[in-house]
Image (spheres, rainbow, N blue to C red):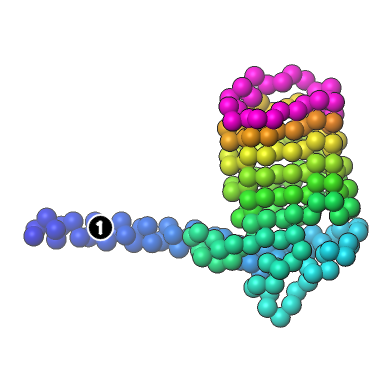
Amino acid sequence: MRLAMEASPLLLLVSLTLLLATFLQAKAVPSLQDQAGALLAWKATLQSQPAQLQSWSRGNNTSTRPCSWYGIKCRKHQVSHQEVITGISLRGLRLRGDLDALNFTALETLTSVQLSHNKLTGRIPPSIVSLKELRFLLLRRNQIRGPLSPALASLTKLQYLMLQQNELFGEIPRQIGELEGLVKLNLSANHLSGPIPGELGYLNKLSMLDFSSNN
């Protein structure tokens, strides 16, 4: 009985700590309204407005409406149990604009970004490293410029990294070898130069690798 009484305060403290941690994590997840706002702010910067994006607008019920927008996928967050945006798929819409204008920090629950076959310019935004759940980054056939950031290695759940047919330059960061979950890596048809890092040998799940048409 005495041991049980002595253990009770400790168990209570552990329970409160876990409850607080769960609350803080849930609170940290951007709301659906904030995520919708980030998408609308990016849409406003686009030089072209394809008909498919007409569904991107604020309605009377902003908490659910973004999940019915064209190319947007939602699901309930595991911790907060609130609806969040998990996917963007806008392939082949001839979008013209700056990818860096999209606030990925507000979209940290994304698991898939499919923006291939557009005319997006600028660099790969530094804010993209906030997408800790990202599994698919598909930016093929755009006009994205700049070097590949070593910070991409922080996207530890990434499985598909498809950046071919852009205007990337510089060396391939050796830190890419830390993305041990990569299944497909395509950096072909860019302006990359330098050696192929030996660290890529750690990518033992890789089934496709293409660095062709570079320097």
Q: Residues within 10 Å of mark 1 (few under 14, many from 20)?
A: few
Q: Secondary structure at mark 1?
A: helix
| Point 67% across, 45% down: residue | 136
On the rendered image, what quadrant is the C terminus found in? Answer: top right
- Using the image, determine if residue 84 lies above or below residue 180: below
* Residue 193 falls inside the magenta stretch: yes
Q: Nearer the viewer, residue 188 or 151?
A: 188
Residue 208 position by quadrant: top right
Residue 178 visible to an observer of this rendering: no
Q: Nearer the viewer, residue 170 or 115?
A: 115
Q: Position of residue 69 (x, y in %)?
A: 74, 66
Instruction: Write down the region rendered in magenta.
Output: 191-215
* Residue 130 falls inside the magenta stretch: no
Q: Is residue 131 left or right of residue 58?
A: left
Q: Position of residue 165 (x, y in %)?
A: 84, 36
Q: Position of residue 103 (x, y in %)?
A: 72, 55
Q: Position of residue 203 (x, y in %)?
A: 60, 28
Q: Label 1 belongs to which residue? A: 11
| Point 54% across, 61% down: residue | 77
